Image (cartoon, coloured by chain):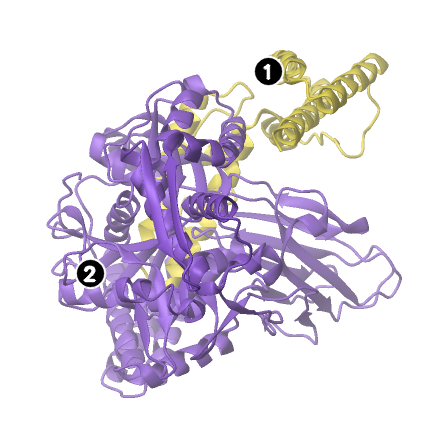
Amino acid sequence: MALLQISEPGLSTAPHQHRLAVGIDLGTTNSLVATVRNGISVVLNDENGRAMLPSVVRYAADGSVVVGETAQAMQSEDAANTIVSVKRFMGRGLNDIGDISRLPYRFVDTPPAASPFATSGGSGQSASTSSGQGGMVQLRTVAGVKSPVEVSAEILKVLRNRAEAALGGELVGAVITVPAYFDDAQRQATKDAARLAGLNVLRLLNEPTAAAIAYGLDNAAEGVYAVYDLGGGTFDISILRLSRGVFEVLSANGDSALGGDDFDQRIHCWLLEKNHLSALNPRDTRLLLTHARTAKEQLTDHGETRITAVLSNGELIDNALTRTEFQSISQNLVQHTLQPLRRALRDAKLSVTDIKGVVMVGGATRMPQVQNAVGEFFGQTPLTNLDPDKVVALGAAIQANLLAGNRSGNDWLLLDVIPLSLGIETMGGLVEKIIPRNSTIPTARAQEFTTFKDGQTAMSIHVLQGERELVSDCRSLAKFELRGIPAMVAGAARIRVTFQVDADGLVNVSAREMGSGIEAAIVVKPSYGLSDSEITRMLQDSAQHARDDMKARALREQQTEASQLLEAVKHALEQDGDLLDQTERAQIEALMTALHDTLQHTDHLVLKRAIGALNDATVSFAQARMDKNMAHALAGKNISELEAK
Amino acid sequence: MQPVSFNLQQNYFQLFNIAQVYQIDTAQLERQYRALQSLIHPDKHTHLPDAEQRVAMQHSTLVNEAYQTLLQPMLRARYLLSLHGVDTQEETNTIMPLDFLTAQMEWREGVAEARRTRDAALLDELEMRLHRETRELESQLAVKIDTEKDYAAAAGLARKLRFMERLAEEIHAAYDAMDA
């Protein structure tokens, strides 16, 4: 790994302390946690020295939860209560999952999240959401109905505990990786899971981008690179330009439902066919899938492997599978990954000859047929000098270290993109694109609409994500109604709909009626996400089983936030206090004192209010400071300094 | 609050500190873009309070928008002409020379034909030709705006460029459809 120096005094707002931050690769098959220690990014092992935590969660009737190897060992015996590859269900409805008969779970279709919006401003206008489709799928276990978000949170909790034990303190935050091709619902679900696991998310980072950081910083790479990331359940391709400390994603593409699991399924189907078997019970299904995976891994280094298993009815399965046969039954899966490659190149306006190197990520890229196909496509041997299982977590840790404020000697910047276009429904069930795919984030776009009938006082807005022209072919993110538009003649009202995509790739949509001078804004969260009340309920549920008291934790979090805020504002006043007049400064200082006085308070809500008050009072100061920074930059001084690096 | 010299009202050329012309120095634009983002990107401000993080997101969003506007030939033409008080009227002014419209029809038929027969070679050829003609339009635009300062004529060329852009989108969609 690249040698990064730990924080130099004076660079961080809290130079005396190294802030504990981790990178987490929340994978379909395995999950990992890594951190930067003594300037080097390292994966943190469990007490048995294992880096990879199988992403398997088992629920018992008494409410206890087991995660990892122990759960994995029970996956055939207790298939219905042992959740494997939960990442495939994140932010997904029952309709998205495909052939559920092949999966040993009891699925529950759920209505969309209730009222996933907030109303601000106020003049009699209101908004409401509704959605014609179901919400995120849930799973019925002996311990009750569980959302994929809750299941993922169990995995994250284990990794958080592992990290806090290894690092000897509470984490300031985590960077969690997601497939680049994840849509908004899947990203939101991941962020909710982290929140549920008590993690402060510094950033959601695209997996190929994380790999590029680890690879690029390690090899001082310059030029255009392709990252081919075939994980357990997702496929991503990203094209990045690396130059002088900037990682610029030019395009991303992929398939969020294609991965190593599908190769296991192909072997599974082959076994069924060879042995003339039809539908199996959940235990046998899981048993054969487990053997299929082992066979797949064997065939990486061997020309042939033997699959031997005894089904629950005593029937013996005993088949030899050659690498050639495996390659032939999985050929179209490999071919399927080449379409996104072509699209990504076209979107980046590049051809294969522009690609300087191809970085392979994800355990599934160990399969020789994958390496051969990718090598042939790009006309060069892919780079495999980094462990494809660990490179994402290592890169995430490096980014987490930077975002936590532990400045290292060599600074860099990531410019990532939104992988799927955003649009709204127009007449005739068509989608009008507002933000095209591969726009650099953060990004925003506003579009104005008007009423088409005299006296119309409401308007319905349907937000979608995807590339297809028809509403029914895209993912519905949210449907909301803007009510209380003042009655006017048709075409007189001006409703401005603004899409804002933040640096996590998460979307916020707001609508504002401007024509009348009355303004109200609504903020819409995706209907596939969880509402705040659901998160609160889940937090309470998990608190019943958790050892530590949630309230105490909330208080500690607020205390930490308060201290950080006080320190940051103090620092800002020292640096740029001259931007404020006396009244402004006095007001901020009064609120600082007030916040300082509440530090010893035992009610976290009191602290929260004081933090909010100080935050609000410093809004214009913040604006002025940022403007001053920009002014400096434009004066040319800082720019030349930056370029010199 | 004391006034500061920098404000978001200044135009995009000033923001990136490059000459206000059509034929820009792309390398310089890229350098300035990266330098600005290195200062204002939200990742650089994660340790600051929420208020400053929000400002960083807004500034970073604006710089992305400004960069794309100057980087993309059509957007740059439209923006630069608007600074000269000329509206390019791509959506409203549909009066185009007849030969141009006829050529457009032929283009479209060609793309549709390639898409229907899944003829990748034909699509490649159309794309290359489109690329050449687009370049040609861009150099004409540079002359009209930068040298002759004939903004009305430039607006006509910008509208043509918009047509070419739509064709490029159609070719792109045809490639996507042929992949599927």
Percent position (x, y) of residue A522? 61, 66
Percent position (x, y) of residue B48? 31, 59
Q: Residue at x 52, y 52 (%)?
A: A277
Same chain for labels 2 and 1? Say yes or no. Answer: no
Percent position (x, y) of residue A223? 34, 24
Q: Residue at x 25, y 82 (%)?
A: A547
Residue A471 placement, left or right of A241? right
Within the image, what quadrant is residue A365 found in?
Answer: top left
Q: Quadrant of the C terminus of chain B?
A: top right
Residue under label 1, please give it.
Answer: B142
Residue A14, above or below A347: below
**Element marked by disc 1:** helix
Can residue A580 be seen at all in this image of the molecule? no
Q: Residue at x 62, y 65 (%)?
A: A521
Residue under label 2, please give it.
Answer: A20
Farthest residue in the bottom direction? A602
Q: Quadrant of the N terminus of chain B?
A: bottom left
For the residue pair A382 and A371, the one nearer the viewer reads as A371
Mark 1 is on which residue type?
Answer: Ala
Within the image, what quadrant is residue A201 found in?
Answer: bottom left
Note the chain letter of the yellow one. Answer: B
